Image (cartoon, rainbow, N blue to C red):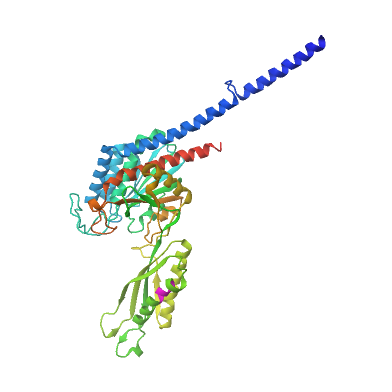
Amino acid sequence: MDKWVVRSSIFLLFVAMSLAFRFSLNPNGKHFDSLLTCLNNNNNNNISSSSYLKERIVELANDPHTVDWMKKIRRQIHKNPELAFEEFETSKLIRQQLDQMGIAYRWPVARTGVVATLGSGSSPYVALRADMDALPIQEMVEWEHKSKVDGKMHACGHDAHAAMLLGAARILKQLQDTLQGTVVLIFQPAEEQGQGGKDMIAEGVLDNVDAIFGLHTVHRYPTGVVASRPGEFLAGCGSFKAKIIGKGGHAAIPQDSIDPILAASTAVISLQNIVSREIDPLDSQVVSVAMIHGGTAFNVIPDSASIEGTFRAFSKKSFNALRERIKEVIEGQAAVHRCTCEVNFTGTEHPIIPPTVNDARIYEHVRRVSIDIVGEGNVEIAPIFMGSEDFAFYLDKVPGSFLFLGMRNEKIGSIYHPHSPYYTIDEDVFPIGASIYAVFAHSYLLNSTRNLNSYD
């Protein structure tokens, strides 16, 4: 009997300890399988919440009042175009809109730029960028909101870019309580001069920024289609100017002169051989001489002659190598013809812009966002382009991605290439651009916060 009592007591004690241990792991009394179901439901709730926010952003972007407001802003900017570092009225208009929305900003940045922030005020930080300068072009489009300034025109879509970024700001302000970090809104001057991005960075606009996104309206794709690519996207662009110095004299007695015209001519021809005979045909590069100056009379050999041109390449390695080879060729041809030369690559009017290289991870995020907004069939892989963009300066500092936003629409004449005096914007693209801006920023912050929490 005693043995039975002892054994029973031990058994009951063991059962009690087991139950206590199990309860400590699952205090609410749920089975482990039920707990997994609960966790999965929480994850599904997060996914549903994220999907709802995307839908809400698109809904807000397509609200007729928001669309009309973006069009109004764009048209005000379009009627009063301002060139690089002269965007005082454009900047004032942007600041007025930010003030009305209650969004804090810093100004002036790089003379006329504006940098606004909204969200938690803490990390992570994500940046959205739009440019705002016009071009020295006489507008030939006859419409109600035609440029009022002779010889100046928004012929590259920067008025639309600024309006869409303001649209994104308006949307994100309404969803500010859901932002899991800080959004930095960069309204940049002087993109056309290739200097604005550098100057903005020098004044700290990328401090603490983890990623950046920008877009550009293009006529290559119809309205509703977007395109980009991972890695090398747009070419780096550089300019060069060479002064070849000889010895002037009468053209009838050339033996007493050192002819810089001849040296310049052979330099131009030899520069063409770099791409055609020295570069891998699969590594696209360009060297073009577009200006030649020399002499003031038909029978006088001048003291000097100058040539100017541009060069482009898609990788930094190729770009830098091309630059060095241009210098070697010009100096070599000058020496062969007994001349000296000065080769300059750092002109202030046309500074060197590096290749635009999209970060693969950020590109993929932008691609998924774009699919959510315009549908998978309207998201394309873009080919590489020889055009250049000073957004490349930002990508040199932080991971980011650049996107082409299609807006070709034959019915309204939105068919002309950038820098054309007939350049026309299809304003139906505004809700798409504002949505992509806003969803990218919101979802990037949300994903970044989740990734950080997963390591806690």
Task: Give the left or right position of residue 402, taking residue 454 as reference.
Answer: left
Is residue 155 within the magenta segment?
no
Q: For the point 48% across and 38% down, which residue is it?
A: 449
Q: Quadrant of the C terminus?
A: top right
Residue at (81% x, 9% y) in the render:
1
Q: Judge whether residue 205 can be spotted in this image.
A: no
Q: In the rendering, at what x and y percent does residue 26 appear?
A: 60, 24
Q: Is residue 247 above or below residue 366?
A: below
- Residue 181 or residue 375, whichever sits in front: 375
Q: Position of residue 391 (x, y in %)?
A: 39, 54
Q: Relative to residue 397, is residue 343 depicted above or below?
A: below
Q: Is residue 334 above or below residue 384?
A: below
x, y percentage for residue 160? Answer: 29, 49
Where does the magenta region start and end? 270-274
Snapshot quadrant of residue 354: bottom left
Q: Residue placed farthest to the front in the image?
A: 377
The secondary structure that dominates the magenta segment is: helix
Residue found 37% across the figure and 76% down from its top: 268
Residue at 78% in and 11% down: 5
